[in-house]
């Protein structure tokens, strides 16, 4: 006679399945929330911030605020004050063509300056006279092997305080 152990039925644990279902639901909810947050604040949001930053970026050349050209490489800057006249010089290079730089600066300087553009062989020149402040900015763009060499020269009169 062979002896076979009697099988006892296992007790169902309903709480474990409820716990598993709730955990699975929470994992799905957190995953969906993460995707939504990433889409809203992820790389495209950084691109929008970068675009806004580039549109509003300015540098003080002497005592005149000039827009910064995106991707430009700064070569050097000087500033001096003599008899109430503040002069500044800035040099930079860009891989873009002189016409593209000229178009950028003409558009960005228009609100604050009266702008006159002169096309030259292999480049261009912008004379910008301040509308509200006594200042002049001269921007010269020259074609180079790497794209464009630019020079900004400013003059501004110190205001008496």
Image: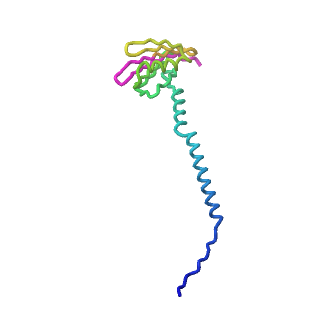
Query: In the displayed image of the protein, which residue is found farthest to the front?
Result: 1
Q: For this view, does 158 lie left or right of residue 75?
A: right
Residue 148 is inside the magenta segment = yes
- Rendered image quadrant of residue 134: top right
Q: Residue at x 57, y 46 (%)?
A: 34
Q: Residue at x 56, y 40 (%)?
A: 39
**Residue 21's spot in the image, x, y percent?**
62, 58
* Count of marks overlaid on the render: 0
Query: Residue 8 or 40: which is nearer the viewer?
Result: 8
Q: Main secondary structure of the magenta part?
A: strand
Query: Residue 6 or 13: which is nearer the viewer?
Result: 6
Residue range corresponding to the magenta coloring: 139-161
Q: For this view, does 50 lie left or right of residue 98?
A: right
- Rendered image quadrant of residue 71: top left
Query: Residue 154 or 36: which is nearer the viewer?
Result: 36
Q: Dividing the image into 4 quarters, which one contains the C terminus?
A: top right
Q: Is residue 12 above or below residue 86?
A: below
Query: Residue 76 or 109: which is nearer the viewer?
Result: 109
Residue 130 is inside the magenta segment = no
**Residue 35's spot in the image, x, y percent?**
56, 45
Query: In the displayed image of the protein, which residue is found farthest to the left?
Result: 145
**Residue 120's spot in the image, x, y percent?**
40, 12
Q: Which coloring applies here?
A: rainbow
**Residue 62's spot in the image, x, y percent?**
48, 21
């Amino acid at each position: 006679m062979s002896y076979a152990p009697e099988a006892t039925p296992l007790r169902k644990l309903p709480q474990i399945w409820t716990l598993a279902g709730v955990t699975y639901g929470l994992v799905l909810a957190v995953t969906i929330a993460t995707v939504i947050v990433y889409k809203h604040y992820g790389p495209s949001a950084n691109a929008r911030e970068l675009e806004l930053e580039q549109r509003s970026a300015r540098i003080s050349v002497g005592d005149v605020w000039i827009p910064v050209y995106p991707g430009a490489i700064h070569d050097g800057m000087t500033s001096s004050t003599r008899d109430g006249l503040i002069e500044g010089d800035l040099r930079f290079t860009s891989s873009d063509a002189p016409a593209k730089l000229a178009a950028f600066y003409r558009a960005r300087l228009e609100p604050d300056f009266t702008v006159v553009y002169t096309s030259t062989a292999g480049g261009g020149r912008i004379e910008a006279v301040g509308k509200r402040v006594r200042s002049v900015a001269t921007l010269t763009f020259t074609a180079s092997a790497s794209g464009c060499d630019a020079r900004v020269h400013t003059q501004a009169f110190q205001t008496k305080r």
